[in-house]
Image: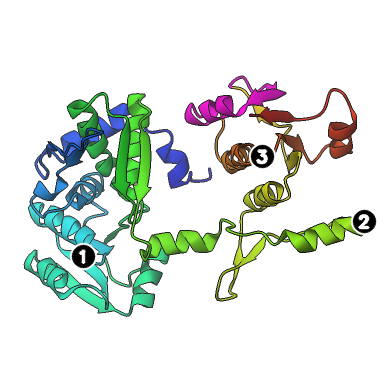
Amino acid sequence: MQKQSIAEAAFKLTLRDFEQAAERISKDVIVTPLLPYNLPDRQLALKAECLQELGSFKIRAGANAIETASDEDLLKGVVTASAGNFGQGVAKAAQNRGLPVHVIVPDTAAKVKVKALKDLGATVTTVPFSDWWNVMMTRSAGVDGFFIHPVAELEVIIGNGGIGLEIFTQCPEVEVIIVPFGGGGMISGIALAMKALGKTPKIIACEIESSTPLKAAKKQGKPVKVEERIIKNLIKEDFIPVISPLGLNEKKEVFNINADIAAGALAKNLKSRRLLLMTDVEGVYDKNKKLITEIKASEAEELIYNETISEGMIPKIRTCIDSLDNGVRAVVIIDGRKPHSILFELFSDKGSGTLIRK
């Protein structure tokens, strides 16, 4: 049986999963208060995770990851890669359980954080940033021990979800939660905990422009500018443009862009009446796996939230909604396996696939 991805497992988490994690790590963390910080036109509150023993929420993730590991996994201790804070969280949780811990840090790590790791009893190995990043990407540290990834670890995400449970308990009417993004572990935990609670506050990620994960996300590519002049000229000369979804940054470096996102960007810039997205299913299905022939954008958003729409269909639907918000009149998701599906959509009264309107 194929092992499910972290994303697949994360979307199946229940409220009990988060509650059990909170119980597991209750000896390691405190319930931090929401401190009022009101402005003239709105009410704000700050979740004071700085009051945790090490001054950071990272102890939640480290403790939960260790608590859920088997005795066999922990025989040789714990290993992680961190620039400081997560390593301290893991080191403290390991110290509380009498476990050895080895932390791989980049040569850019602050000396004060390296000292803090050593003060917690961690063995610290400093490596060039590129080698450290490779450890993050491969989960291979070259030392014995149970490796805990600071972000891409389900138990890390679940441990962080306790923040979401506390926010809801302290402020059930919360409408918006603004979360520093970092590697994404905390915001994922909070969002999934809110989902498990059946709550839908708007969750906003914030980050400094120079942060490594955000720069990497920008590399993955969302088009900022589309050079439509060439495309329009080709169309004018009766050519059908076949476009590879590649983009250039300001340094003329080439990056791959999700094909659906690229198609949406083209449709917006060309002010297209209709965008057709071809896939390997009939269109969008309801919970009973029946084809939905027509749907509004707001209804599609709801289907994403209740998990009727999932996995690879999500970026397609997001592209559809973004295109509709930017002038495209209608978007259709059609079955590319079906012969003449485009002709059937364009020239028949019944159409094909799922039509999405504003």
Q: Along the horizontal axis of the image, is 74 left or right of 269?
A: left
- Residue plotted at (66% across, 59% down): 226
Q: Would you name the residue on which mark 1 appears?
A: 84
Depth check, mark 1 against mark 2: the one in front is 2
Residue 260, x across and y down, in percent: 65, 48
Q: How many numbered discs, if any?
A: 3
Kind of residue sitting beneath label 2: Asp
Sequence-first tag of 3 and 2: 2
Are the residues flagged by discs 3 and 2 in contact, CB closer than 8 Å?
A: no
Q: Is residue 152 magenta?
A: no
- Residue plotted at (51% across, 64% down): 219
Q: Would you name the residue on which mark 3 appears?
A: 327
The colouring scheme, among rainbow, by chain, secondary structure or one colour, is rainbow
Which class describes the residues within 10 Å of circle 1: few (<14), some (14-19), or many (20+)?
many
Q: Give the range drawn in magenta.
A: 287-307
Residue 320, x across and y down, in percent: 64, 38
321 or 155: nearer the viewer: 321
Kind of residue sitting beneath label 3: Gly
**Could one spot residue 299 in this view of the protein?**
yes
Checking the image for residue 238, the label placed there is 2
Q: Is residue 291 magenta?
A: yes
Secondary structure under badge 3?
loop
Sequence-first tag of 3 and 1: 1
Secondary structure under badge 1?
loop
Kind of residue sitting beneath label 1: Gly
